[in-house]
Amino acid sequence: QLQASGGGLVQVGGSLRLSCAASGRTFSSNAMGWFRQAPGREREFVAYISRNGVYTYYAGSVKGRFTISRDNAKNSLYLQMNSLKPEDTAVYYCATDRGYGNLRYIPRRLDEYDGWGQGTQVTVSS
């Protein structure tokens, strides 16, 4: 079970830090990802982090502005979002890699993840 939190209303150029709390599974055994879904659009990949946090990968639209991290001791995943833009407005979700990720492949499809919980709304106002 995953629960995202930390969303809110922020002005253009502002920052937010999202958190994802994991329960009911061995968090450190799984790579994790963040996704987002804007109104009227499909859910899309945002960022990926390996089980030990060493490897990260970002969608081109957020690279250089967002940072994914994790704290396995706290069963928690994070997404630091800086320089926010109106197009970042969406519901953000965390999810667990079903085992597709490795050194040669970063999973980015929805069906490669599970454990979807309730998302958290991020609204960037101009």
Image (spheres, rainbow, N blue to C red):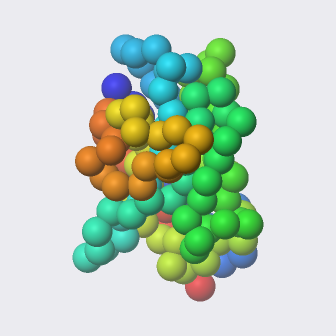
123 lies above or below 76:
below
Q: Residue at x 26, y 76 (%)?
A: 40
36 to the left or right of 40: right
x, y percentage for residue 96?
41, 35
Q: Residue at x 34, y 55 (%)?
A: 109
Q: Residue at x 61, y 53 (%)?
A: 57
The N terminus is located in which quarter? top left
57 to the left or right of 120: right
Quarter of the view holding residue 55: top right
Q: Nearer the viewer, residue 33 or 85?
A: 33
**Whether residue 17 is visible:** no
x, y percentage for residue 41?
29, 74
Judged from this view, the residue extending furthest toward the bottom is 126
Q: Nearer the viewer, residue 116 or 63?
A: 63
62 lies above or below 45:
below
40 to the left or right of 92: left
Q: Residue at x 52, y 38 (%)?
A: 102
The C terminus is located in which quarter? bottom right
